[in-house]
Image (cartoon, rainbow, N blue to C red):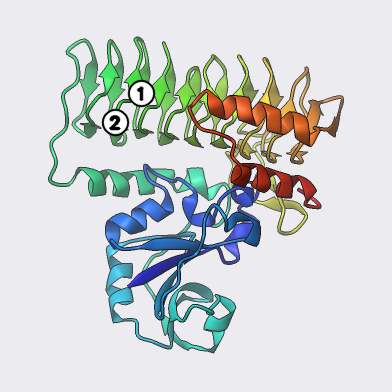
Amino acid sequence: MNRILFDGTARAHLLPLTFTRPVAQIRVGILTIAEKWEKYLPGHYSFLTEEYLKKKFPPHYTAENLFLNGALCPSEALLESLDKLKENQALYAEDQLLAFYGPAEATPESAESLERISFTREVRLVDRPWKVFSENGAEMANDFALLTRGRSSASLSSSNTVIGDQIFVEEGVVAEAAIFNSTTGPIYLGKDSTVMEGAIVRGGLALCAHAQLKLGAKIYGPTTIGPYSKVGGEVNNSVILGYSNKGHDGFLGNSVLGEWCNLGADTNNSNLKNNYEEVKLWSYAYGRFMPTGLQFCGLIMGDHSKCGINTMFNTGTVVGVSANIFGSGFPRNIIPSFSWGGATGFMDYRLDKALATAKLVMERRGISLDETERGILEHIYQLPNN
């Protein structure tokens, strides 16, 4: 059965993270949502996403397709219901469309005409930016069980201190003189990842393939450090999607960083308001700040954005794609894509300059800024209210 992960209504609410990727390409726990589905329900998957993203993430159709909500995390209960789902039926949790069968021309909107089947069990939808970190612990535990079931962990050097037995080490891991406490959550060290001396980890932690924890890093779980990322300083309950750096001292808490981001030395974010009130976060979907229901909420940063040394981000700050932030003081809580500046004001970050920087950054990881990637960034630059 051909399977297509559709963006649906979650896409607009997950901006700026979904400016550059389909919803199901967001990482929460150890795996992306798409990778989770591939593990739970093996087969061919593609994406139904925005037109300008289709060159990089093309949909693949057959005569009959199973469409799955890209914000939906899989579970055994969902698999049971999907197995019973028939042609001309759609699976809903209350008013939320979860899945449906359809032909190549089907869309989530067309599912409204299908027979509605109710799913009454718990569902986990990552349909808001803060859910990436708030659901990270539960998804990390699920992914850890999924990835390690029936497998044996590689060994760690005896120079490390290991507390608890929820730790799994993939091949090629290098870790010396670090402390790992897995009594508070699982610790997963991905293939060829590195943990330098003096790092202290209080699980859960997902250190994905080729990622690094720097000297003396302090990690409070549940935290995910995506592939090829480098992290130092203090991090608490945050998700770094991949290929991004927070290499120096400074605090990152209850936050999400996209790919190709860099936080300058001693960058800090606030994750708690001084009056302890609920944090509001900018919503691209509504065009205003919206309540999160959370007391702790830090920084949401889109792909390719950077900040200089000693940058300070206030509670509940949203940064778009390819912004460059620097200078003293707190910049405002919503920083549009392709902005250049800081607390004293912003100007337009010229597209040619932004693309030149992106090219250099990606080349350092052996990846080229090809015409497809350029086209995505050029399209975002032209979007109103980006």
**Residue 317 relative to residue 165: left or right:** right
What is the quadrant of residue 200 in the picture? Answer: top left
Amino acid at circle 2:
Lys
| Residue 332 disc label | none
Q: Secondary structure at mark 1?
A: strand
State the residue at coordinates (78%, 55%). 287
Q: Is residue 69 above or below residue 311?
A: below
Q: Which residue bears the numbered disc 2? A: 191
Q: What is the total number of numbered labels drawn onto the structure image?
A: 2
User: Alpha-carbon neighbours of circle 2 within 10 Å: few (<14), some, or many (≥20)?
Assistant: some
Residue 90, visible in the rendered structure = yes
State the residue at coordinates (39%, 44%). 29
Q: Secondary structure at mark 2?
A: loop
User: Alpha-carbon neighbours of circle 1 within 10 Å: few (<14), some, or many (≥20)?
Assistant: many
What is the quadrant of residue 266 in the picture? Answer: top right
State the residue at coordinates (81%, 26%). 341
Quadrant location of the N terminus in the rendered image? bottom left
**Residue 321 relative to residue 78: left or right:** right
**Residue 223 relative to residue 169: left or right:** right
State the residue at coordinates (78%, 17%). 328
How far across and how far down the image is residue 28, in percent?
A: 44, 46
Q: Which residue bears the numbered disc 1? A: 201
Amino acid at circle 1:
Val
In the rendered structure, which disc, 2 or 1, sits on the residue that comes first in sequence? 2
How far across and how far down the image is residue 51, in percent?
A: 64, 61
How far across and how far down the image is residue 283, in percent?
A: 70, 52
Q: Is residue 211 above or below residue 83?
A: above
Q: CA distance from mark 2 to mark 1?
A: 18 Å
How far across and how far down the image is residue 77, in percent?
A: 29, 68
Nearer the camera: disc 2 or disc 1: 2
